[in-house]
Image (cartoon, rainbow, N blue to C red):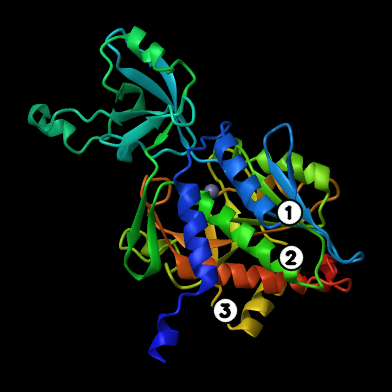
Amino acid sequence: MARKALAADPIKERLRALTTDLMLIPGLSGHEGRVRRRLAAELKGLGIESRSDRLGNLIASIAGEVGRPSVMLFAHMDQLGLVVRKIEANGLVRVERLGGVPEKALPSQSVVFCVGERRDVPGVVANKSHHATQPDEKYRVPAYADLYVDAGFASAAEVLVAGIDIGTPVVYEPKVVSLAGGRIAGTSVDDRAGCAVVVEVARSLLRSRRKPTTHLVFSVLEEFNVRGALTAAQTLSPDIAIQLDLMLATDTPDMTARGDMRLGGGPGMSLYSFHGRGTLNGTIPHPALVKLFSDTADKEGIALQRSAQVGVLTDSSYVQLVNAGVAAIDLGFPVRYTHSSLEVCDLADLVGLTHLLVKGIERIDSAFSLDRDDYER
Ligand SMILES: [Zn+2]
């Protein structure tokens, strides 16, 4: 008995291995090549051929039964970060933000200038010496425009020789910290954990005899313009789109009023997302998919948490508008400390999400209706 209790869940261990592998690969928005090649190799290992489009999306298809609505299951490969803006004469480097980088978490970060595999250059985001910090500065967040990165160089010429120039991508130094209870902290849990789940779902669907055609898309540019997956959806014309990404965990003291999403409490389903900061976009999921995944969770005994958040936006907002409309939904996993260099997720939630997706997708049969009048009462 003790032996059985100790036996590792192979799905959990594969998710741990691939998520942490992917977290350690730099892939700033618009520069996803290294992540894409790793995922293409992973798919090839499963016997799945993939291709990429001109934007950089990695696309693969698992053929299913004709007559069932087709599915596009997707997660984004890219991560947020910085771009070199100016190189000072003394060798210090100024940066521009790319994506929702939290300014208050930048000073004292170690970063990496992505100049090429095995040639990347480490640096540190400067934090003004504490001994010289005035009382009025102590609780003020410095503007990112005033920050600089110190990579040890003493002149602009040295910086250029190292391969760093204006436009060079910069990311948080990739790292993984294993926490107690199967929790993982580190860089780009958003959305490498989602990518790992897509691979694990594909592994199961390959063995499944009755299923819809399922397209796998590992998308680009999500942290930049939340539209990278759009070109893949235009090419694939799926009936259904399922986006996997983080859900805001709200079980820390600073987040309790925002919702009811517990880390380790199971996968999440978004019932409402809206950016609310200018894009005027978000996703209200198609009711057929809400019912599908709610029923699947009930039947399979999977705890499914619900999310409704303003301030959140994913590619599904744009994918849903393709052609005559795509039935879209956001599913995901709770994450704490989002967009910091130490995002935290729980492997058990990734396992639950994998089961929910496999069982849910298998239930999409030829009688599965996407007619809203069958659901909206
Ligand atoms: Zn994301």
Give the amino acid at mark 2.
Leu
Q: Nearer the viewer, mark 1 or mark 3?
A: 1
Q: Look at the numbered disc 1 and give the secondary structure of its residue.
A: loop
Could you say which disc has been placed on residue 48 in the image?
1
Precedes in sequence: disc 1 or disc 3: 1
Q: Tell which residue pokes out farthest to the bottom in this image.
A: 1
Residue at horizontal 11%, vertical 33%?
Answer: 135
Q: Vertically, is 145 above or below 118?
A: above
Residue 260 in sight? no
User: Which quadrant would the C terminus be assigned to in this image?
Assistant: bottom right
Q: Horizontal and vertical percent for residue 82?
A: 44, 30
Please name the residue that numbered disc 3 is placed on: 302
For image coordinates 47% across by 22% down, the residue present is 168
Q: Which residue is mark 2?
A: 206
The verdict on label 1 being within 8 Å of ligand 1 is no
Image-based side of 29 in relation to 241, left or right = left
Residue 324, how many percent across, how many down?
86, 49
| Cβ atoms at labels 1 and 2 below 8 Å apart | yes
Residue drawn at x 55%, y 35% is 29
Which mark sits nearer the N-terminus, 1 or 2? 1
Mark 1: give few (<14), some (14-19) or many (20+) Cα within 10 Å: some
**As displayed, is residue 313 above or below residue 85?**
below
Dot 1 amino acid type = Ile
Using the numbered discs, state the Cα–Cα distance from disc 1 to disc 2 in whole angstroms.
9 Å
Q: Residue at x 75, y 49 (%)?
A: 49
> Does residue 358 appear to the left or right of 269 in the view shown?
right
Residue 339 relative to residue 332: left or right: left
Q: Which structural element holds mark 3? A: loop
Quadrant of residue 90 in the image?
top left
Give SS at disc 2: helix
| In front of the other: 12 or 55 | 12
Who is closer to the viewer here, 53 or 105? 53
